[in-house]
Amino acid sequence: MVVGLTLYEILGIQHDATTEDVRKAYKLKALETHPDKLEPTATERERRGAEGKFRNVCDAFQILSDSAKRKEYDERIQRARINKKAWDEEREKRNRERDIWARQLRQQSEARMKAREDFYGDIRKIKEEKARYDEMVEGFYQELRAQNPEWEMRKQEVLKA
C-alpha cells in the first residue's frame, strides 16, 4: 500500500461514500491502473509499479466494499489520527524544550564570553596601568639623575670595580 494515502484516497472517494460509489470508483481505478494497459515496451520497473498500484486499488476495494472490514478500517484510521495528534503534541513539547535548552545554553555561553571579555579587559587595564606606572617611575628616576649628576658617575665607578 502507498504510504500516507488512505484507502479512500487510493480510490478517490469520500469517507461517506456508499458501497455503490466504492464499486464504481474501483472499476474506474482498476481500468486506469491495470498492468495490461501498459505498452508492450514498458520496462520491468514500470510493470512492477503498475502491479503495485493495481494491488493497492484491489486491496482498497476489498476492504471498503465489506461493511465490517470498512468499519474496522475506519476505527483503525481514527486511532491512528488520535495517536498522530498525541505524537505531534509530544514532538511540539520536545521542540519547545529543546528551544528553551538551546536558549539557556546560548545565554550561558554569552555570559561566559562576557566574563572572559571583562577578565581580559581587566588584564588589559592592569597592563596599561603598569605601563603608565613604569613610565612614571622611569620619569622620576630621570628627573633625580638630572638633579644629581654625581649619581651617574658613582654608578659607573661601582660598575668598573
Image (cartoon, rainbow, N blue to C red):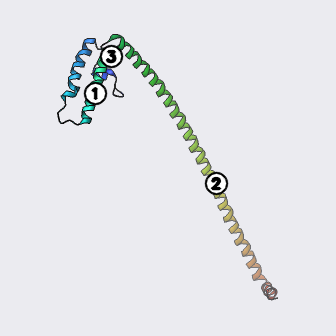
Q: Is residue 2 left or right of residue 100?
A: left
Element under disc 1: helix
Q: Position of residue 137 (x, y in %)?
A: 74, 72
Amino acid type of disc 2?
Asp
Q: Position of residue 125 (x, y in %)?
A: 66, 61
When asked about the image quadrant of residue 159, the answer is bottom right
Task: Residue at 24%, 32% (x, y): give it.
Answer: 47
Q: Position of residue 18 (x, y in %)?
A: 28, 12
* Inter-mark Cα distance, 3 to 2: 71 Å
* Inter-mark Cα distance, 1 to 2: 67 Å
Q: Is residue 38 left or right of residue 143?
A: left
* Placement of 151 over or under 65, stated as above or below: below
Q: Is residue 158 left or right of residue 56?
A: right
The earlier-in-sequence mark between 3 and 1 is 1
The earlier-in-sequence mark between 3 and 2 is 3
* Placement of 98 over or under 52, stated as above or below: below
Q: Which residue is mark 2?
A: 118
Q: Position of residue 14 (x, y in %)?
A: 30, 18
Amino acid type of disc 1?
Lys
What is the crowding at mark 3: few (fewer than 14 residues within 10 Å), some, or many (at least 20)?
some
Task: Residue at 44%, 19% (x, y): give it.
Answer: 79
Task: Residue at 70%, 66% (x, y): give it.
Answer: 130
Q: Which residue is mark 3?
A: 63
* Placement of 156 over or under 13, stated as above or below: below
Amino acid type of disc 3?
Ile
Where is the N terminus found, in terms of image quarters?
top left
Task: Residue at 46%, 23% (x, y): give it.
Answer: 83
Q: Which residue is mark 1?
A: 53
Element under disc 3: helix
When asked about the image quadrant of residue 31, the answer is top left
Element under disc 2: helix
